[in-house]
Image (cartoon, helix red, strand yellow):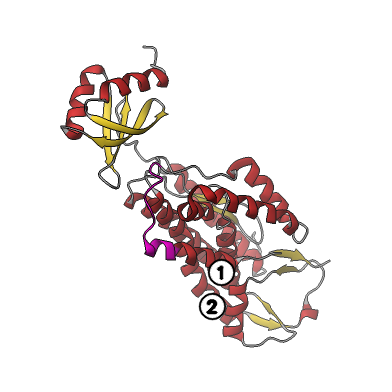
Amino acid sequence: MTPRPVEVILRNVLEEVEPFFEVEKFYGRPPGVVLVGKFKAGGHDAVARHFEPLGYYTKATPLAGERWLVEVSPRRLERPRRRILVNVLLFVATIGTTLGAGTWQRGGNLLRPEDWLLGVPFSASIMAILLCHEMAHFFASMRHRVRATLPYFLPVPHPLLGTFGAVIKIESPIPDRRALLDIGAAGPLAGFLVAVPLTVIGLHYSAVVSPGAAGAGTVIFGDSLIFKFLTYVVKGPLGSMDVSLHPLALAGWIGLWVTSVNLLPIGQLDGGHVSYALFGKYSVWVARAAFLALIPLGFVWTGWFFWAFLIILFVRLRHPPPIDDAVPLTPLRRLVAWVVFAIAVLTFIPAPINILS
C-alpha cells in the first residue's frame, strides 16, 4: 500500500475533526499529524470513534488550560519498545575508558590488570556525575510525559577525560515552557549537586605544591569561581602555591566544567532550554550574544573556536518553541532559571586547559 503523504493526512484530518475538536495549532509529524486545541463534545472518545473507520489511530495528551495534544496517524500509536543494548554497551565502554584515564593519572601501568584499581576513584566519580545529570533529564521528561531515551555515554580513550560526557534524546514534543524549564534545568542542577561534594572530598586529598615543580608538558587546569572558592575553603589561602589535583577533585573539576559548557544559553543545549523557557522568542538574542562571545574567548583558549564550530554545525542558535508557548513560568521556576544561570557563571572557565611548554 502506498503511504499517504502527510499533507494529504493533514487536510483530511482537519476536515474530519472540526465537529469534535477546536484546532489552535497543527503540524505534520510523519507518518501522521499533531493537533493542539480543545475538545468540543464527546472528548477524545468521540474523536477516536470517528477516525477508526477512516483508518486512523488517535492518542490524546492533556496540556495546560484544558488544552490537549492529539496525535493522528495511519499507524498504531503504540509506544516503541525501549532498546537498551546500545546504551548498556556504551555505558560499559565508558567505564573502561574512564578507568583507563584514572589509572594513567595515578601512574599505573595499563598493561597490568591489577593497576586498573587505581582508576576506580576517578571513574566512579565522573560516571556518577554524568549519570545523575542525564537521569535527572530523563525523569523530568517522564514527569511531563515527554518521551526520551536512556543516556548514551560517549567513551573516548583520552588520558585525562576518558569520556566526552553523555546525552539523552528527546523523542516527542515538549508541551510548554514549564516542562522545558524542568527538563533543561534538572540535569545541570543534579550534576552540580554531585560534583561539588566530590570536589570538596578530592581537594581534601589533593597535595599543595610549588608552581616550580611543574615541568614542561604539565597540564594546567583553569579555575572557575566555584572551584577557587572550594579550594580556599578546603586548603585555605595558597599564596603562590598550587594544588596537584587528586582524581576525585579532577572528576569534580570535569563535572563542573561540563556543566558550564552545557549551560551556554544557545540552541538546544541545557542553557538554551532554560533561556527559552525564561525569555521565550527573545532567547535568540541571548544565544547570539553568547555565540559572539565565544569568538574573542577563542583567542584565550582555542578550544572555544572548536565549540563554536560544533554549535553552528549541530546545535544552531535558535531554540524551537514548545507546543504551547503561552503558558507562563511560575515564580518558583523563574527562580530556578536564575539559579541555573548563576551556576553557569560560577562554573565558567575562560581557559579550561593549558599545557606548559
Counting the numbered discs, the total is: 2
Mark 2 neighbour density, 10 Å: few (under 14) some (14–19) many (20 or more): many
* Percent x, y of residue 232: 61, 83
When the figure is inspected, residue 126 is found, relative to residue 280, above or below; the finding is below
| Image quarter of the N terminus | top left
Q: Earlier in the sequence, mark 2 or mark 1?
A: 2
* Percent x, y of residue 36: 33, 36
Q: Residue 15: which disc? A: none
Give the structural element (helix, strand or loop) at label 1: helix
Residue drawn at 60 percent across, 42 percent down: 314
Q: Residue 252: which disc? A: 1
* Percent x, y of residue 335: 43, 66
Residue drawn at 54 percent across, 51 percent down: 283
Q: Is residue 108 visible?
A: no
* CA distance for labels 2 and 1: 8 Å
Q: Quadrant of residue 300?
A: bottom right
Q: Is residue 197 visible?
A: yes
Q: Quadrant of residue 348?
A: bottom right
Q: Amino acid at mark 1?
A: Gly
Outermost residue toward the top in this view = 1
Left or right for 14, reference 237: left
Residue drawn at 23 percent across, 22 percent down: 51
Left or right for 17, reference 10: left
Left or right for 43, reference 238: left
Residue contact at pointers 2 and 1, CB within 8 angstroms: yes
Mark 1 neighbour density, 10 Å: few (under 14) some (14–19) many (20 or more): many
Q: Residue 200: which disc? A: 2
Give the structural element (helix, strand or loop) at label 2: helix
As for residue 269 lying within the magenta part, the answer is: no
* Percent x, y of residue 280: 48, 50
| Image quarter of the C terminus | bottom right
Q: Which residues are magenta?
A: 323-336
